[in-house]
């Protein structure tokens, strides 16, 4: 995991002196790495300065050294092209549902949902994520026919207007229909493991997909979630899904990963993942982070704010994720996020006065 992050004018001298490595090809650099190995008794961890890795022999000896070297290269390399997007990119959220935690019921009318998506693109969204089934904690599933009825007019309307559309679904039938209607990307909370036909649906359309981690399923996922080490358990799960899909003939460059903030995680779990986000860059694919308006923000602030009043915490999380190499930010408040990213870019450009 990359540690000791630096951004801005201080980063270049560290790179030139061999004391740091670039993080995901972006403006941040890391000066230290934590190497974690699973043991029967838990995790064995070693923190090493980047400049001392060669001297420690960790890059040159044995299979473990080769693994460290390969992961180090993946941490440093620019994120590969994904779904035709210039990264980092903003993904706007359009929920066509009556019960989503933040905006349920606001866009049930297809024309209102299309208009909202167009506004998001005008405000800076690179693509719009359309969902017809709430996956908030405790949500009940909806019938596939109802999900299709909700999303297809919106997907088709946005695609006809030239908008890049992703379909947020865990059903293969909805994936296929939405891709036929013009969606270019599948965003699946089950990482293409929730429906036996999902892999074939993505393969048949040559579509990229976002693979998310979720412990359990929406109705029960917040009922006492447990992990040995949430940061590393999620990493191993996502790596396993990438390996399984590669074995099924779908190359890794077709995928991005999402650690699933709030999906079967406590506040402490969410914070552990966000603190260690850089670990997921070692998977070598773009990283999506979706924390917009989520309940843990209000619980941390202790203010009991309603979902739409969590903008400040959402923006703080976006900027934190960008510094740690996130490629795609899934958000409700597109204009505000785009403005925050513009300032982040200016501050982290590395240009001295």
Image (cartoon, rainbow, N blue to C red):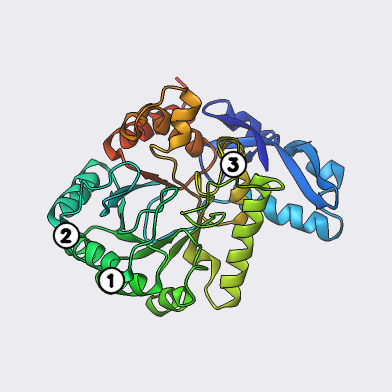
- Nearest to the eye among marks 3 and 1: give it: 1
Q: Is 62 rendered above or below residue 232? A: below
Q: Nearer the viewer, residue 321 or 83?
A: 321
Q: Is 50 rendered above or below residue 200? A: above
Q: Is residue 276 left or right of residue 342?
A: right
Residue 145 badge? 1
Residue 161 badge? 2
Residue pictured at 72% horizontal, 48% vertical? 228
Q: Nearer the viewer, residue 265 or 82?
A: 265
Label 3: which residue? 273
Q: Reading the chain from its start, which is encountered first: label 3 or label 1?
A: 1
Residue 164 badge? none
The local crowd at label 2, few if under 14, some if 14 to 19, many if 20 or more residues have their Cα within 10 Å, is few
Q: Reading the chain from its start, which is encountered first: label 1 or label 2?
A: 1
The reply to whether residue 150 is visible in this rendering is yes
The local crowd at label 1, few if under 14, some if 14 to 19, many if 20 or more residues have their Cα within 10 Å, is few
Q: Is residue 257 left or right of residue 234?
A: left
Q: Would you say the residues marked 1 and 2 are in contact, meaning their CB atoms lie under 8 Å apart?
A: no
Residue pictured at 24% horizontal, 45% vertical? 120
Helix, strand or loop for disc 3? helix
Helix, strand or loop for disc 2? loop
Which quadrant is the N terminus positioned in?
Answer: top right
């Amino acid at each position: 995991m990359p540690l000791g992050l630096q951004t801005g004018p201080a980063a270049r001298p560290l790179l030139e002196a061999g004391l740091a490595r670039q993080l995901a090809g972006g403006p941040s650099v890391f000066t230290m790495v934590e190497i974690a190995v699973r043991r029967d008794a838990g995790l064995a961890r070693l923190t090493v300065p980047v400049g001392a890795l060669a001297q420690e022999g960790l890059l040159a000896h044995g299979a473990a050294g080769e693994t460290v070297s390969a992961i180090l290269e993946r941490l440093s390399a620019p994120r590969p092209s994904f779904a035709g997007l210039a990264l980092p990119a903003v993904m706007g959220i359009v929920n066509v549902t009556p019960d989503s935690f933040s905006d349920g019921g606001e866009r049930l009318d297809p024309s209102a949902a299309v208009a909202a998506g167009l506004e998001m693109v005008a405000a800076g969204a690179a693509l719009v994520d359309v969902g017809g089934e709430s996956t908030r904690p405790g949500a009940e599933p909806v019938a596939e026919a109802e999900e299709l009825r909700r999303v297809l007019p919106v997907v088709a309307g946005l695609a006809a207007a030239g908008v890049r559309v992703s379909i947020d679904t865990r059903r293969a039938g909805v994936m296929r229909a939405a891709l036929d209607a013009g969606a270019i990307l599948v965003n699946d909370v089950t990482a293409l493991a929730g429906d036996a036909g999902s892999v074939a649906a993505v393969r048949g359309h040559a579509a990229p997909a976002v693979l998310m981690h979720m412990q359990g399923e929406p109705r029960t996922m917040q009922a006492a979630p447990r992990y040995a080490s949430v940061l590393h358990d999620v990493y191993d799960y996502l790596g396993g899904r990438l390996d399984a899909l590669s074995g099924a003939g779908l190359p890794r460059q077709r995928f991005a990963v999402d650690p699933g903030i709030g999906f079967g995680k406590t506040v402490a779990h969410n914070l552990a993942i966000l603190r260690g986000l850089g670990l997921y860059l070692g998977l070598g694919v773009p990283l999506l982070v979706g924390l917009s308006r989520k309940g843990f923000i209000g619980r941390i602030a202790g203010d009991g704010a309603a979902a739409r009043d969590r903008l400040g915490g959402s923006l703080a999380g976006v900027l934190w994720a960008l510094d740690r190499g996130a490629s795609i930010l899934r958000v409700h408040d597109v204009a505000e996020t785009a403005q925050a990213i513009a300032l982040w870019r200016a501050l982290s450009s590395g240009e001295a006065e």
